[in-house]
Amino acid sequence: MATTLVLDALTAEVTAALGPRLVSFLLYGSAARGEDPTGGPMDTLLICDAADEPLYAALEPLVRRWAAAGHPPPLVVTAREWRESADTFAVEYADIRASHRVLAGADPWVGIVVDRAHERRQLERELRGKVLRLRQGYLAGRGDGRALDELVRDTAGGWLTMLRTVLRLAGRRVPSAAGDVVRACAALAGFPPEPVAALVAAARGADGPTLAPRDPRVAAYLAAVARTAEYVDSL
């Protein structure tokens, strides 16, 4: 209930601050999926008529309070950018569409089409890039438990978005819990689900994983991401 009240207050403030300039205001991500009932960070998307200094000035005081409460500032997209970017951000559009709430304004999905070919192509490109960056980070921080913690925490959320996309492209149900998403994809892509599912679930929690230097769970995580990229290439 407290989370709902906080979100309602932000929505009322954004609506009052922007008036007719607000096109749509959305909640998306883990909060929209109901993954964290304890009131964790909430991701929001603001679609407006234009992104300019008057808009930033109107939003600044309320966004400062929102960020101080532990939430990321809203993503700001113009109505034109929103209409024209579904091919560029096909993965993100599909993921937001699957789990969102319209808090204020119009339904933003009217006329928006996410092409499956664009989604698959972007997914493979981003997975291949993530593999390279993970290998780089693992090589640099393999002997440092804290560095490995940060590596997993910084990359787990993005990989989960990609895994949800994999399941949708394969016509499978997308679970809510992070660990279950990993396990469902493990069955498709052919990597061992554990300890990767438990590691990713811990990374998404408040405390995060506690990894030792050269922790074998990180090597398993890296191998799972690489195997996922290979699987998407076969779709």
Image (cartoon, rainbow, N blue to C red):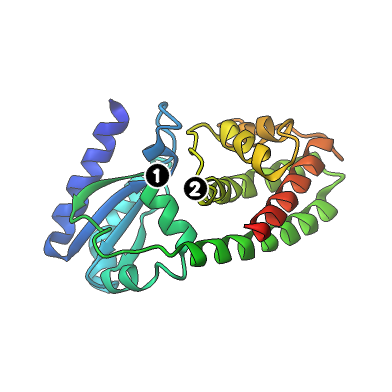
**Count of numbered tags:** 2
With respect to residue 54, does 110 lie above or below? above
SS at circle 1 = helix
| Amino acid at dot 1 | Ala
Does 152 sit left or right of 115 as displayed?
right
- 212 lies left or right of 70: right
Residue 203 visible? The answer is no
Of badges 2 and 1, nearer the viewer stands 2
| Along the line of sight, the residue nearer the viewer: 172 or 131 | 172
Where is residue 62 shown, x and y percent of the image? 27, 51
Q: Where residue 222 sits in the image (x, y, percent)?
A: 76, 48
Q: Position of residue 58 (x, y in %)?
A: 22, 62
Q: Quadrant of residue 216?
A: top right
Q: Is residue 142 left or right of residue 184?
A: right
Helix or strand or loop: what does disc 2 sit on? helix
Which quadrant of the figure contains the C terminus? bottom right
Mark 1 is surrounded, within 10 Å at the Cα level, by few (under 14), some (14 to 19) or many (20 or more) other residues, namely few
- Residue at 38 percent across and 44 percent down: it is 99
Find disc 2 in the rendering and name its residue. Answer: 168
Disc 2 marks which amino acid? Answer: Arg
Q: Earlier in the sequence, mark 2 or mark 1?
A: 1
Q: Position of residue 14 (x, y in %)?
A: 21, 53
